[in-house]
Image: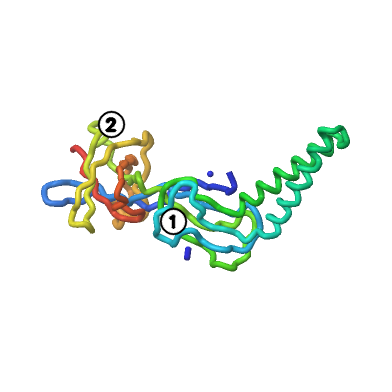
Amino acid sequence: MKKKIIPLVILLLAGSAIVLKIRSGRDFRYSGTIEATETDLSARISGVIESYGAAEGEPVKKGQAIAALDCADLRLAAGLAAEDFKRAEELYKGGSVSKENYDRLKYKRDDSALKVDWCSVKSPVNGRLLYAYHEKGELVGPGARLATVADLSGVWAYVYVPHDLLAGLKTGQEVKGYLPEAGDKEFPGRVSVIHSEAEFTPKNVQTRKERTRLVFAVKISFPNPDETLKPGMTIEVKLPE
């Protein structure tokens, strides 16, 4: 199996953009790699993993428990803290308990309840469980990464274009993307970011000549309601010449 702690670390699922201008029929297309927003879910307390609420690849809902820790000791402590505070509350009303002790027991009750809540690690987004990093029965500590969830409802790809093409591009402009592995299926997209600083073509381009060119990164966003586009897929984008 494979930025709140839970800690929720919002990451960009980095795919390396392929920066070659591809000729397809009479169209020139720019190729990039689909990326999506990832959220890492981490433990805030130590505990033994009791279960996962979904399998890798399955859809998950916002608020759904993704991982559950065995916290029998914390639940017991929380119950005792609640009882102690309840007694102290009655005594405080009668003037038999100081404000200091009342506040201390109230804090202990609330802190214990919070730790019990941390035993269930929930997804902050609707998405899909990409990775679960541990097995049932494993002991994990605070900060241990338990799972990664990706929001696939909207994805993007970066393409890299020469400066002479920038004059024909603007943010919000509609473009078309094509998925070669799905018979050139067409996907509507739009230009969401045009970087203003030139850079060398990324190193994963095959030829030395291409790698020495200065290009501009252009982010193309795609709505993805049916989640057809997955991180790591190659998409070809037709830009206006």
Image side of residue 125 versus residue 86, left or right: left
- Label 1, on which residue? 129
Packing grade of label 1 (10 A; few <14, some 14-19, many >=20) is many
Q: Nearer the viewer, residue 137 or 143?
A: 137
Q: Which residue is the extreme one toward the left?
A: 26
Image side of residue 234 versus residue 126, left or right: left
Q: Quadrant of residue 75?
A: bottom right
Q: Of the residues tagged 2 and 1, which is closer to the observer? A: 1
Give the residue drawn at x 59%, y 57%: 144
Q: Position of residue 152 (x, y in %)?
A: 37, 49
**Type of amino acid under label 1:** Leu
Q: Which residue is the extreme one toward the right?
A: 96
Q: Position of residue 146 (x, y in %)?
A: 54, 58
- Label 2, on which residue? 170
Give the residue drawn at x 37%, y 42%: 199
**Type of amino acid under label 2:** Lys
SS category of the residue bearing label 1: strand
Q: Quadrant of residue 195?
A: top left
Q: Position of residue 233 (x, y in %)?
A: 31, 55
